[in-house]
Image (cartoon, helix red, strand yellow):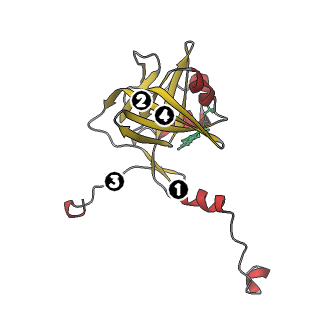
Amino acid sequence: MSATAALGIAPAPAPISDAFRSTMRRFPATVTVISACRNGADHGMTATAVTSLSMDPPSLLICLNNRTYLHDMLLEVPEFAVSILTDRQAAVSEGFSGKIAPERRFDAADWVRHERGMMVLGSAHASVVCRRMGVVPYGTHTIFIGQVVDTRLSQDTVALMYENSKYCAPLHALPASQN
Ligand SMILES: Cc1cc2nc3c(=O)[nH]c(=O)nc-3n(C[C@H](O)[C@H](O)[C@H](O)COP(=O)(O)O)c2cc1C
């Protein structure tokens, strides 16, 4: 037992940012790879901060840390792709979040070049190609708003998710009575 606990003194409250980090760790998120191409050079990175924004116009948003390479790239190129990974593609997520050097990230898995120029994962759970329509800087991150120009959806795959610093997948549907 610590000295403060022995004296009945409550530990100092953690800063709100620590509490928020712990909370978000338990917030399950779908794992994607964002990709773009600038002057013939491809780049991609793993991201979970991806959200549907509106249907009219069909749009989504992604949030990128200002220090990432892709952040600077997306300020320059007009379009980007979001490949939603399947539960068999955790290694792709690891590769695109730093385990593989940027210039070798597209060597593994079945990346194909989309007609709009960027790489898209052929065996992804789904993919969405977007035209950049808005850029909103906020703190350490920037929100990029993309209007959807193309989508592809696989019928027989399960999305890869990330929760509590672990990869996981939705294992079962709830009974119809709870749906
Ligand atoms: C599961 C997972 C989700 C991530 N989500 C994001 C995200 O939404 N936004 C972000 O900026 N970085 C995110 N990252 C971190 C980037 O993938 C990581 O910093 C990557 O190395 C950046 O690419 P770069 O090395 O080419 O700059 C995530 C990493 C992992 C493993």
- According to the image, label 3 marks what residue? 171
Q: What residue type is labelled 1?
A: Asn
| Residue visible at 51% across and 31% down in the picture | 134
Marks 2 and 4, how far apart at CA: 7 Å
> For the C terminus, which image quadrant?
bottom left
Marks 1 and 3, how far apart at CA: 16 Å
Asked if the residues shown at circle 1 and circle 2 are in contact, with their CB atoms under 8 angstroms apart, the answer is no
Q: Which comes sooner in the sequence, label 2 or label 3?
A: 2
Q: What residue type is labelled 4?
A: Ile
Q: Which amino acid does label 2 sit on?
A: Gln
Q: Is the distance from the Cβ of mark 4 to the nearest ligand 1 atom less than 8 Å? A: no
Residue 5 lies, in percent from the top left, at 73, 82
Q: In which quarter of the image is ligand 1?
A: top right
Callout 4 crowding tier (Cα within 10 Å): few <14, some 14–19, many ≥20:
many
Q: What element carries label 4?
A: strand
Marks 4 and 3, how far apart at CA: 31 Å
- According to the image, label 2 marks what residue? 147
The residue lying furthest to the left in this view is: 176
Residue 170 lies, in percent from the top left, at 36, 52
Residue 47 lies, in percent from the top left, at 52, 39
Q: Which comes sooner in the sequence, label 1 or label 3?
A: 1
> Marks 4 and 3: which is nearer the front?
4
